[in-house]
Image (cartoon, helix red, strand yellow):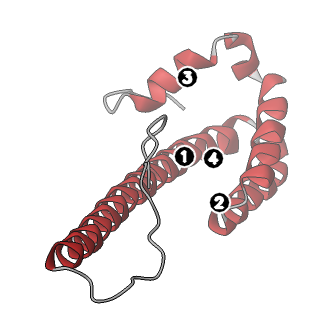
Amino acid sequence: MTEKGKVHVGEVLGPLKGLPSALDGFNALNQLVNAARECITVHAVENSKQARIAAYETTEVTRIKAAESILRNYFGQVFAERRTNFDGLFTRLDQALEQGNAEVAGAVLKSIVDVARTSPLGDLNDLSQIRAALDDPDQVWDL
């Protein structure tokens, strides 16, 4: 694998005429060892990237679930008449997250936000305040 912008240069040898020299054998061995090292390095780097992505996914899904719990409770009390609607939306969100379907999860989240905009949450106009409150473990929620 080459680094961006770096080009490997070399020559392809045709069939050897006669016995290869010890130097030819040594060079071939070095090429094999270097190729194997590069392959192992790339494999390790890619595995690390995948592990970071998996950890990020787990963290974000956990945060979404925590926020969902708080919102379910809030919506359940403030919007008792809309409870069935929110339960259905959050059930679909759970299903989309479990299936790894980001497109459906995004659509469901949009629906939840659209419904929430017609609520007292819509008067906040700054969802970053909600996000900060959800991220704050010391936040006290008065329901």
* Mark 1 lies on residue: 64
Which of the two discs, 4 and 2, sits closer to the camera? Answer: 2
Mark 1 and mark 2 lie on one chain; the one further toward the N terminus is: 1
* Mark 4 lies on residue: 72
Residue drawn where x is 75% and y is 55% of the image: 87
Q: Amino acid at mark 2?
A: Leu
Where residue 82 sits: x, y (%)? 83, 44
Q: Amino acid at mark 3?
A: Ile
Direction from residue 108 to residue 47 in the image, left or right: left
Crowd rating for badge 3 (residues with CA inside 10 Å; few <14, some 14–19, many 20+):
some
Which of the two discs, 1 and 2, sits closer to the camera? Answer: 2
Direction from residue 34 to residue 53 in the image, left or right: right
Look at the numbered disc 3 and give the secondary structure of its residue: helix
Residue drawn where x is 38% and y is 26% of the image: 139
> Is 45 located above or below residue 66 in the figure?
below
Look at the numbered disc 4 and give the secondary structure of its residue: helix
